[in-house]
Amino acid sequence: MLSPLILIAAVLNGLMIGAVYALVALGLTLIYGVLHIINFAHGALLSAALFAAFFAYQKLGLDPYLAAVVLTPGFFVLGYALQRFVIGPASHGDDRNMLLVTLGLAVLIENALLYAFRADTRTIDLAYGFKSIDLGFTFLSLPRLISFVAVFAVALALWLIMSFTDTGKAIRAVAKEKLGAELAGIDVAHIYAVTFGLGTACVAIAACLLIPTYYVNPSAGNAFVLIAFTIVVLGGMGSVPGALIGGLLIGVVESLGGFFFGESLGQVGIFLIFIAVLLLRPRGLFGASA
Amino acid sequence: MKTFLPIALGVAVLAAVPIFVHSNVVLNFLVVTLMIALAGQGWNILGGYGGQYSFGHAAFFGTGAYTTAILQANYGVNAWLGFAAGIAAGAAMGGIIGGLAFRAGLRSSYFALVTLAFAEVLRILASVAPITGAGVGILVKLDLRAQSFQFQSRASFYFVILALVAASLIIAQLIERSRFGVWLVAVRENEDAAMALGVNATAVKLGAMIVSAAITAAAGCFYVQYFLFIDAGIGYGTWMSIEALLTPIIGGVGTVFGALVGALVVKSLGEGAKLITGDVPGLDLMIYGAVLVLVIRFAPRGIVGALADIYARFGRRFAPSRKTAVEAVRG
């Protein structure tokens, strides 16, 4: 007899991991909303951020949550520079070229990591890595609970930036009407780069939240990004609430799918959702138009 | 016949290689390179001429490979029949994915994502389903006879793959000069405008996808004959999808020789890097990524396009540059 408590535990676990998916997807959807391209380098950047968090702990003894304070602005600058000096100039204003350049960067970054650190999978041991909270019927991993809360804090911060700062308003203006924004005196290349930087900063935070319970290797980020693609499509490309809700939903689907059908078929479920949404409702649940 | 002269010359030069080179290492390198060129030429039909950038051409490579491998290993079907069946299955897969994606009106990032997702679903299914040998893959029995599409010498394999590449070059040339090709390029340049002029964009893209898938599937079938093995990571892996688009883009997107030139350059760079530094994992692929970014930055029409520009600049109208109207206006 299947106890409902086990199901609730699976759902809770799904929500926890779903929050991190949502954060990765948030970066992706932000970039899509403004630049109108899927950033294929997102996964490689996540792997790079995981390595950065790993070495910050290993070499400097920096706690991952503290490392986030350094890595987040660091990756913002990295993302800004990538868009401003590499992706922007290389794409000649063509969407398809932009896709290819991010793909090229993905291959470059992932294999640079492979070249530098080899394919070994590494983990860190933290005092609180396996701490959990007893809910009576199940245990909640403490680091995952922290990441769950942190993701919502990041989403709130992003929302505040978008709503109340001049830069945020400029980003929204460019997303809505690029030419009009340019005529109004907004530096579109700068705004593109800022957006790319924000998306990359999301990845750095996600890495710091993941590393206490997750592992790192040169392709560690890819698993998340394939899921993040699904979330972004499901929630509607460019929609921030869509990314959050989509992330939680996919986390739960994966957790329940894995519970009922085993790990690898649970993943097929995610991709089938992905394809179904793309074909039947490409603007997603919250998106405005495809 | 003048239009096919460059193809005849290029193929003749490549066909002469085994006369001078007997090293199995070199021949093996060329066989693999030509196989990637063939897969890339498939991508080029849809992506280069049609402007639909697929990020999941492994779906067709893998379908071709698995079809012929399963038919041979499980049902004892003749390898040449399996080869034909593999191409047909790849084309059918192209028809299914293309039919779904184009009817749903997916473009640009959306099309890239849906093709990627199909390849991933196929990869996961192939890595669990019993008929594809699940995680183990499929081994084809060694039977070194020409009637089972297996050869004693590398040179024979080389001539077979060269013939396939030659056929793909001729197909590209025929498409380029046909009405269908003109429609395809019109769709690439401006789909809405093409539709306003009465081009059935969905049908044109679907047709290109089927031809494209069939050519890439042929590369997959050849892979199985050459290595006598296929598994999900090779057949449907992301890397196959990337190589299929990398070669024509670096060589010259939407040109007859793009994929071939791209494959030769990219593979030579990769092997060169390995020779210099030893077999360090990652370095060759790192170079591929860097070259991709640099080519798009400095030679967006690839090596062939850049060469055409150089010819045009020196006043000879040997290879007229194919600038689009928009590019011409921008200068």
Image: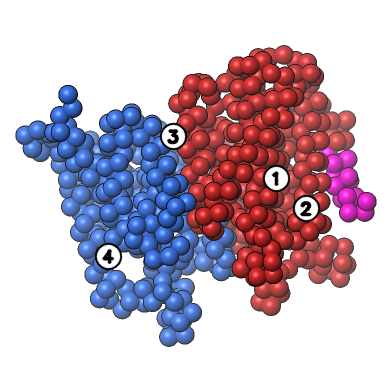
Chain colours: A blue, B red
| Mark 1 surroundings within 10 Å by alpha-carbon count, few (fewer than 14), some (14 through 19), many (20 or more) | many
- Of tags 2 and 4, the one toward the viewer is 2
**Residue placed at 26% from the left, 49% from the top?**
A248
In the rendered structure, the residue with mark 1 lies on which chain?
B
| Mark 2 surroundings within 10 Å by alpha-carbon count, few (fewer than 14), some (14 through 19), many (20 or more) | some
Image quarter of the N terminus of chain A? top left
* Magenta extent: B1-14
In the rendered structure, the residue with mark 3 lies on which chain?
A
Q: Which residue is mark 3?
A: A119
- In this image, B123 relative to B214: left or right? left
Distance CA(mark 1)–CA(mark 3): 37 Å
Q: Foreground: B292 or A113?
A: B292
Q: Identify which amino acid the numbered label 2 is placed on.
A: Ile
Distance CA(mark 2)–CA(mark 3): 43 Å
Distance CA(mark 2)–CA(mark 4): 50 Å
| Disc 1 to disc 4: CB gap under 8 Å | no
Q: Quadrant of residue A238?
A: bottom left
| Disc 1 to disc 2: CB gap under 8 Å | yes
* Marking on residue A158: 4
| Disc 2 to disc 4: CB gap under 8 Å | no
Q: Which residue is mark 2?
A: B175
**Residue placed at 26% from the left, 67% from the top?**
A159
Q: Quadrant of residue B95?
A: top right
Mark 3 lies on a secondary structure that is loop
Q: Which residue is mark 1?
A: B211
In the rendered structure, the residue with mark 4 lies on which chain?
A
Q: Identify which amino acid the numbered label 1 is placed on.
A: Val
| Disc 4 to disc 3: CB gap under 8 Å | no
